[in-house]
Amino acid sequence: CLVAIFNQPFSMGEVTLAEKDPLKAPPRIRHKYLSDERDVDAFVAMCQEAVEIAYGMEGRVFLPADAGDALDRRDTWERYVRGYATTNYHPTSSCRIGKVVDAECKAVDVGGLRIADASVFPDIPAGNTQASCIMVGEKVSEVIGKEHSLSITYAQ
């Protein structure tokens, strides 16, 4: 199975409050997938390259029937990408360091709140986010420990 994955899109979504009081309504999440044409261009190119690789390995290409069958045409791939592209399930950067949180992951203008996950990344990593999330958590735990005169001991 060969899958085209685009890890660093140009399209940017947003997360905003639906109500002034965040406890009254869930946030509005607008993914805005493929809102930047450069993402569509990149996906189309990746799909076309994947077909070349598959054919070079004497493989077959399976697409949903409504995607079209002219695999050498851009419009076929654009229709496919717009209809079937999905997320890698690693959204990041909605609370970027320097914009929404400070260097210690304290939320700007929200007392007592820290954010220590992938949402603080200034940019989307090119790979899986797990290790980066662990590093953010470790760093914030050290900062909190120092603020409260705690010593952090790591298991061997």
Image (cartoon, rainbow, N blue to C red):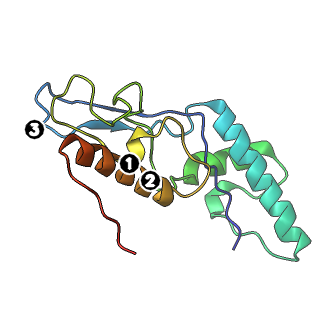
Tell me the number on the disc at residue 135.
2
Q: Residue type at mark 2?
A: Met
Asked which secondary structure carries label 1, the reply is helix
Asked which secondary structure carries label 2, the reply is helix
Give percent across and percent down for residue 68. 71, 55
Closer to us: 118 or 26 = 118
Closer to us: mark 3 or mark 1?
1
Q: Quadrant of the N terminus?
A: bottom right
Task: Kindly identify which residue carries mark 1.
Answer: 139
Give the Cα separation between the discs numbered 3 and 1: 29 Å
Count every numbered label the image shows and give the total. Answer: 3
Give the Cα separation between the discs numbered 1 and 2: 6 Å
Q: Residue type at mark 1?
A: Lys
Whether pointer 3 and pointer 1 mark residues with C-beta atoms closer than 8 Å, the reply is: no
Position of 13 compared to 148: left or right? right
Give the Cα separation between the discs numbered 3 and 2: 30 Å
Position of 150 compared to 76: left or right? left
Closer to us: 124 or 73 = 124
The residue drawn where x is 42% and y is 57% is 134
Give percent across and percent down for residue 132. 48, 53
Query: What crowding class fits label 2: few (fewer than 14 Cα within 10 Å), some (14-19), or many (20 or more)?
Result: few
The residue drawn where x is 72% and y is 42% is 42
Position of 60 compared to 33: left or right? right
Closer to us: 101 or 39 = 101
Task: Kindly identify which residue carries mark 3.
Answer: 23
The residue drawn where x is 65% and y is 46% is 79
Closer to us: 50 or 122 = 122
Whether pointer 1 and pointer 2 mark residues with C-beta atoms closer than 8 Å, the reply is: yes
Q: Is residue 32 above or below residue 56?
A: above
Asked which secondary structure carries label 3, the reply is loop
